[in-house]
Image: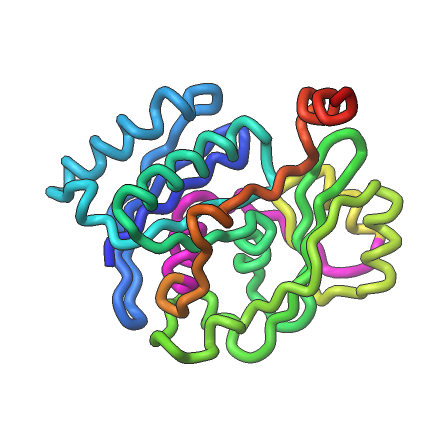
Amino acid sequence: MLILAIDTSGQSGGITLAEADKGSFRVVESAAIAGGTFSAQLIPTLAALLTKHGYGVKDLGGFAAASGPGSFTGLRVGLSAIKGLAETLHKPIATVSVLEALASLADRNGKIAAAIDAGRKEVFLGVYQRNGDSSAEKSSPQPGTNSHHALLKQREELLTQQDFLASLGTERPAVIITSDASLAELAAASHSAVVVVTPPGSEVIARLGARKLQAGETVSVEALDANYLRRSDAEIFFKGNR
């Protein structure tokens, strides 16, 4: 199966073409998309990648979408592109939380806390439980097996920095993983192990998305939606004045 993964959740984004089939996974190629150019560059970048590797749009067998948390505008562009392609081609969609992608980079079992700086002195926190071999996250399972449940979501929520630290004190995770150095410094007060990693990109979204597609964890075009860090100020204003 040829998979297209799109991640436009951050200030910069990217797309990945990958091949997955019965436990195997291979990245064909990834391409970065600069922030502020998502709407203009996403489709041309995809077309160039497909042409370079001898594929056409009709060769796409499934889609992996980074569903947030992230920016309102960026996520809207990426998810709109996937909706249009999936609806036209009648192909399945798997969504991957950016917090889940971040947690998948942890190299140990137990409770994993993934944290993203949400600005305004707030933190988006995802708490997951991994049991068994952590290497299961690095491969795609056979369809119909349960190995895709190696990383189980307990909750995702937006917290103040104070509530974030209080939550860590209650949860006592085996590791706190983040891509923000200042957030890592804040989390160090919890006395848990803190790991700073490079932000997960479209390749990680592709790997986790492939696993979900093979396991049948898909969403319909109508149900595809984003997990925004917060609603845009314009949306809040509009809804509050109707």
Q: What kind of colouring is applied to the model shown?
A: rainbow
Residue for point 39% across, 28% down: 33
Q: Quadrant of the C terminus?
A: top right
Counting from the top left corner in percent of width and height, residue 65 is at 44, 46
Residue 108, by quadrant, is bottom right
Residue for point 45% across, 64% down: 217
Residue for point 39% across, 48% down: 203
Instruction: Judge by depth and name the residue closer to the eye, 213 or 133.
Output: 213
| 115 with respect to 216 (left or right) | right
In this picture, which residue range is highlighted in magenta?
A: 190-212
Residue for point 43% across, 59% down: 218
Q: Quadrant of the N terminus?
A: bottom left
Instruction: Judge by depth and name the residue closer to the eye, 220 or 144.
Output: 220
Q: Using the image, determine if residue 199 lies above or below residue 38.
A: below
How many callouts does the rendering have? 0
| 138 with respect to 189 (left or right) | left
Single out the residue that lies furthest toward the front. Answer: 242
User: Within the magenta stretch, is there residue 213?
Assistant: no
Q: Using the image, determine if residue 21 lies above or below residue 114.
A: below
Residue 230, by quadrant, is top right
Q: Using the image, determine if residue 203 lies above or below residue 151.
A: above
Counting from the top left corner in percent of width and height, residue 161 is at 83, 42
Counting from the top left corner in percent of width and height, residue 159 is at 80, 45
Q: Using the image, determine if residue 107 lies above or below residue 238.
A: below
Instruction: Judge by depth and name the residue closer to the eye, 45 or 143.
Output: 143
Single out the residue that lies furthest toward the left. Answer: 54
Counting from the top left corner in percent of width and height, residue 52 is at 15, 37
User: Within the magenta stretch, is there residue 194?
Assistant: yes
